[in-house]
Image: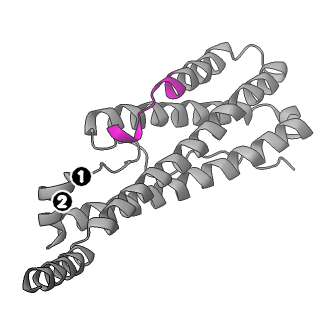
């Protein structure tokens, strides 16, 4: 009987100690990092999906700007090929490679937008204006998604380092810190995609 009471008390203490050790919260926070990463990838994919239509519309009005158009197409191709899995979110080199590819695409889009400003007929094209607004909205979504991802990473990384979570992580979970998605080294702002109106 005493052994049974001791076992029940030990089990209750173990349950209480696990509740306060962060076992579940760390896993939940890691899932939040994965979800935020998925949302960021979706926003990046949306931008990649808009680019072929944008390039085709510009090509119709400015076909001799082949070099700029080709640079955008190549940058899009590299950006869509530079993907990482959620398990690689702790791999700084893999995340940097993806960030660099996305930065090159942003740069190519910026150069395209500068070229477009020389073609007033594009600014009157309703299809192009619709694509322009979609691209602006997508760039905003990317900025928000990147911030949310980085916020989730910050929360998770702190959680696995703080006491007593760090003990639980080291003994039971072995979760690894995740890397932040940094902006392109040369980029301080999102690419300008608002060409304005001539009037």
Pick whichever of labels 1 and 2 is earlier in the sequence: 2
Residue 67, position in %: x, y?
Answer: 61, 15
Q: Are marks 1 and 2 in contact (CB under 8 Å)?
A: yes
x%, y% of residue 181?
38, 48
Q: Residue at x 81, y 26 (%)?
A: 57
Magenta-drawn segment = 78-88
Magenta portion: prevailing SS class: helix
Say which quadrant the N terminus sits in. bottom left
Number of the label disc, if any, that sits on residue 169: 2
Marker disc for residue 175: 1
Near-viewer residue (134 or 63): 134
59 horizontally vs 67: left or right: right
Rendered image: mark on residue 47: none
Q: Dot 2 surroundings within 10 Å: few (below 14), some, or many (20 or more)? A: many
> Residue 165's x, y, as percent?
19, 69
Question: In this view of the protein, which residue sits in the foreground, 13 or 35?
Answer: 13
Local secondary structure at mark 1 = loop
- Please give the name of the residue rendered at 14% of the width and 73% of the height, measured from the top-left corner: 164
């Amino acid at each position: 009987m005493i052994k049974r009471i001791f076992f029940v008390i030990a089990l209750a203490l173990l349950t209480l100690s696990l509740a306060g050790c962060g076992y579940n919260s760390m896993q939940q926070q890691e899932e939040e990092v994965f979800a935020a990463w998925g949302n960021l990838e979706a926003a990046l994919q949306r931008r990649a999906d808009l680019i072929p239509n944008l390039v085709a519309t510009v090509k119709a009005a400015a076909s001799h700007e082949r070099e700029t158009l080709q640079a955008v197409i190549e940058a899009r191709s590299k950006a869509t090929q530079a993907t990482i899995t959620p398990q690689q979110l702790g791999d700084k080199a893999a995340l940097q490679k993806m960030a660099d590819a996305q930065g090159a695409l942003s740069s190519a889009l910026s150069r395209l937008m500068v070229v477009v400003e020389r073609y007033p007929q594009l600014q009157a094209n309703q299809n192009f204006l619709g694509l322009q607004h979609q691209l602006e909205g997508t760039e905003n979504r990317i900025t928000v998604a990147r911030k949310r991802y980085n916020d989730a990473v910050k929360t998770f990384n702190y959680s696995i380092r703080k006491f007593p979570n760090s003990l639980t992580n080291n003994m039971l979970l072995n979760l690894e810190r995740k890397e932040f998605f940094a902006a392109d080294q040369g980029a301080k702002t999102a690419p300008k995609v608002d060409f304005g109106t001539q009037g």
